[in-house]
Image (cartoon, rainbow, N blue to C red):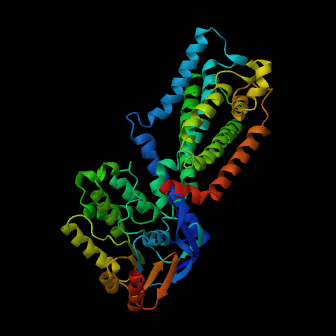
Amino acid sequence: MSAKGPSSTLIEALTMQGRVIQALIMREMKTRFGRQRLGYAWALIEPLIYVAIFMALYSFRGREAPSGIPILPFLVTGVMPFMLFRNMVTRTLGALLSNRALLYFPQVTPFDLVVARALLEIGTAAFVFAIFMVAAQLSDQSLRVERPLDVVVWFAVGSLVGFGLGTIFSTLGPLFASIERLVPTVLLRPLFFTSGLFFTAEMIPAGVRDFALLNPMLHVTELVRSALFVGFESEYADPAYPIQTALVLTFIGLTMQRAMRKRVLTALQG
Amino acid sequence: MIELTNVSKAYRAGSGRRVVLDDVSVVFPTGVSVGILGLNGAGKSTLLRIIGGVEPPDRGSVRRDVRISWPIGFSGGLHTTMTGRENVQFIARIYGAPIRRVERFAEDFAELGVYFDMPVRTYSSGMRARLAFAVSMAAEFDCYLVDEVMAVGDARFNAKYRRAFKERREGASVIMVSHNPQTIMQECDIAVVLSRGKLTMYPSVDEAMSAYRELMST
C-alpha cells in the first residue's frame, strides 16, 4: 500500500489518481443510481418524460415539426444535450459539498471529485443516447446520421460547458451557501427555455434571437441537429462560440479550484 | 522521513485569529517514534492532522516519503451516506490495498453486525470509532499517527485494539499526541514540544518532559 506525498514519481502519482477516480466513480454510481428504486432506468426515463411533455404540447397546438425533421428525434436531440449539460452543472456543483468527508484523505483532491462525477455523467448520457439511437434505427430503417463524429463532438462541447460552470460553482458552493439554491433557478431555468429544446433558432422571433444566441447551449443544440439530420443546417449556430465558452469556463473553473483550494477545504471541514 | 517546511496554520477564533503553527520547519526521521507534548489547545491534534495530510496547512509544505496512516480512530473520513462496507471498500481502493482482505478484516474487527451494511449516519459515535479503528488496523503503514484518546468502546474492544496495534506497531514507528507522560515515555524515542505556534524537538523524551513541565508551571 502506498500513501505517498508529492515526492512520488509522475507515474506513481498518475496511478494513484487513476485509482482514486475509479474508486470515486464506483461510489458515485451507488449514490446516483443505487439508492432509488428505479435505479439506472431513471437515467432513461427522465429524458423520455421531457420528450413526452413536449410531444403533448406540440400535438395539442397542432404544430408541424420544424424543418422537416420528424418530431420525436427532433425533441430527443433537444432534450439530450441539455440534460447532459444540466447534469454536468448540478452534479459537479455538489461534488465537494456532498463528499466533504472524502477530502480528508490526502489522496483525494477536489479535482478528482468533480472529474469522477463528470465522467459518470458522460458515460450515462452516452449510454442513454446510444439506446435512443438504436431504438430510432429499429423503428425507421431509412434513418441515417449525417455526420456521426460531429454529433459526438457537439455533445462533448456541451458537456464541457457544463463541466466548466459546475467546477466554478463547486468552488463557490462551500463558501457561499446560496449558490446551491440559486444555480438551478437563476441560471439553469433561463438556459432551459433558450437552449432550443423544442424549437430551432430560426423559429425564435428576430428581436429575441440575438439574445437567445448568447446561450452557448442553443448553438450546441443547433449543431447537434445539423450534424445528425440530413437536410437541416443551422444558419445561426457559430461553432467557435460554444467551444470558446467551454474552454474559457473550464480554465476559470480549474484555476479557481487550485487558487482557492485551502479556503474551500477549511470551509468544508471547519 | 516526514519533513515540514515553513508550515503555518491559524484558525479564526471569535473576532481574532489563533495561531497554531507559526512558520514551523521540522524533520521527523524514518523509523523514529515521536511524542508530541503541549498544553491543552496548543494545536497538537491539528499538527497531527497536518502531518497526516487530512488538513492542509495555510502556508508551507509537508513532504512524506513513508506510508503514513491517517490519525488512528479519526472518523472524519467516513462518508455518512455510505455503508460501513462501502467506506471500507473505498478506502482500500484509494490505498491500492487488497479490497476483499481489508473488507473481511474490518468487518470482523469492528463487530458492527448488520450495521456494517447500513449507512454510517445511522451509527452511534462509538460504532463510528470502531469502524475507523478497524480500517486503520486493516492497513499496513510505516508510520502510525495516534491521537491521545486511544481508548474506544468497552474494555474488551479496547484490549483487542491494543493487541492489534501492538502487532502493527512492530517494524513501524508512531507519531503520537498524549497528555499522559507515561504513554509517551513507553512508546516514543524522542519528543517535541508545541507551544505558542513554535515546535521544539528534543533528542530524548526526558529532556522534552522537563521542558514541558516547565511550560506547565508558568
Q: Nearer the viewer, residue A227 or A176?
A: A176
Query: Percent position (x, y) of residue B97?
Result: 41, 66
Res A50 → quadrant? top right
In the image, taking residue A171 as reference, residue B141 lies left or right, namely left
Comparing A238 with B154, the one in front is B154
The residue at the point 45 percent across, 65 percent down is B96
Question: Which residue is pictured at 79% across the width and 34% down the height?
Answer: A238
Furthest residue toward front: B218
Count of numbered labels shown in the rendering = 0
User: Which quadrant would residue A77 be assigned to in this image?
Assistant: top right
In this picture, is B36 found above or below A109? Answer: below
Q: Is residue A24 visible?
A: yes
Looking at the picture, how far across and down is residue B102, in whole percent? 35, 64
Give percent across and percent down for residue B18: 52, 66
Residue B172 visible, this orientation = no
Decide: is A9 above or below B112.
Answer: below
Name, please, the residue furthest toward the left.
B156
Q: Which residue is located at x 41 percent, y 62 percent?
A: B92
In the rendered image, residue A194, in percent from the top left (x then y), is placed at 68, 26
Task: Relative to B82, say whether B69 is above or below.
Answer: below
Q: Quadrant of residue A155?
A: top right
Q: Quadrant of the N terminus of chain A?
A: bottom left
